[in-house]
Image (tube, rainbow, N blue to C red):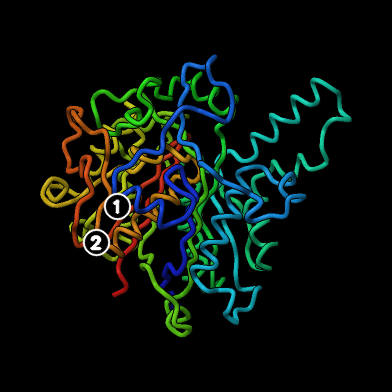
Amino acid sequence: MTKRRVVVTGLGILSPLGNNTQITWDAAKAGKSGVGQITRFDASAFATHIAAEVKGFTPESFLEPKEVKKHDLFSQFAIAAAQEAWDDSSLGSSSYDKRRIGCILGIGIGGISVLEKYHQAYLEGGPRKISPFLIPAMISNLGPGNIAIRFGLQGINFTITSACTSATHAIGESCRMIAEGVQDVMVTGGAEAAITPVGIGGFCALKALSTRNDAPEKASRPFDRDRDGFVMGEGAVVLTLESLDSAKARGAKIYAEVIGYGTSCDAYHITSPCPDGAGAVACMSDAIKSAGLRPDDVTYVNAHGTSTPANDSSESAAIKSVFGGYAKEGLLVSSTKSMTGHLLGAAGAIEAAFSVLAIRDNIVPPTINLDNPQEGCDLDYVANTARKAEVKVAMSNSFGFGGTNASVVFSRVR
């Protein structure tokens, strides 16, 4: 069976850098940081006081006021990003069979804020204080479920939860659904809203978060020798995927083509990546192979680049293993987590969107705060300032707890 070609026809971004795609992308190109002091709750008792929060979000712009309380923040974010992507792709004016349109989102944690809220209500007032909205607001599959309800999508609908690789898996599996003819259109990406006392506290207990509380905008510094952990971010990013033939037939705007996808598992440790980067090598190599490319066909890699001691050196080693001499002789690499923080389950979605926009605009977003690269982190990380470049092919990497890895490859439509 001949596989169908798959393209991106819509984008929706709600991020620490801005509440739509254009504002977010402009901020990323300008090298702005979305990190600041936590405002969602009093974080003074925690080692970490900083995060990359979404700012100025009003769910009432997308939901009736009486509906807002039925949704955890991650789901509110997902609906907002999906609305922008849906409008951007002009799908509302198309004649698609709704049974042929599906939605898969990557969500790493889900409704932790509503769970904390009603656990506290229970402690203070007993079982009668638990809302009937708790379970539907908390469970992660209501992210894509609420999107399907909003747009009447009757096709495939589920959540992928694979830690920080969730959204990249969602995009890759959605692409496969279209390529194999199972669905015609997929609304996909990721959402996360875990900047809560337990969310921050859990990662603090792991000593995974930066404690550069006096300089939050400098805290996320991938590949820099002075990095001390990642910065938690939040938001939602949705991509609309459809077959190339149908996109052309309806005259849709096309951002880029999805041409490769690879996935693997380290089978090494619950939180640490394999030191030699073997799992990362495997998924990047498989993604390039599935795209029918050579490594030196890739212009840009949006790295997982978490700003943690364990990830950045092993990912750099893996990139050098996959790309050989080209890794230092032409490949551009950057970590946009330096600006957005780490969106956990949604990280792969915003980084995929940045890869697509890099192709569209021929500009590579920077790795900010990279002042003194760690020994061994010796690639071209597009330090501190965005760079004009002809971006023909871009790869986005995601690696998560449990050793789960995925890479997705985009190109201009050829």
Q: Residue at x 58, y 38 (%)?
A: 109
168 to the left or right of 123: left
Q: Position of residue 74 (x, y in %)?
A: 60, 44
77 to the left or right of 230: right
124 to the left or right of 42: right
> Disc 2 on helix, strand or loop?
loop
1 or 2: tag closer to the N-terminus = 1
Q: Residue at x 19, y 62 (%)?
A: 390
- Given residues 69 and 329, the one toward you in this image is 69
The residue singled out by tag 1 in the image is: 285
Which label sits in the foreground, 1 or 2?
2
Q: Quadrant of the N terminus?
A: bottom left
Say whether residue 237 is visible: yes
Indicate the quadrant where residue 366 lies.
Answer: top left
Indicate the quadrant where residue 45 lies.
Answer: top right
The disc placed on residue 362 is: 2
| Mark 1 Cα shell of 10 Å, populated few (<14), some (14-19), many (≥20) | many
User: Label 1 vs label 2: CA separation?
Assistant: 24 Å
Q: Position of residue 6 (x, y in %)?
A: 43, 70
- Above or below 98: residue 137: above
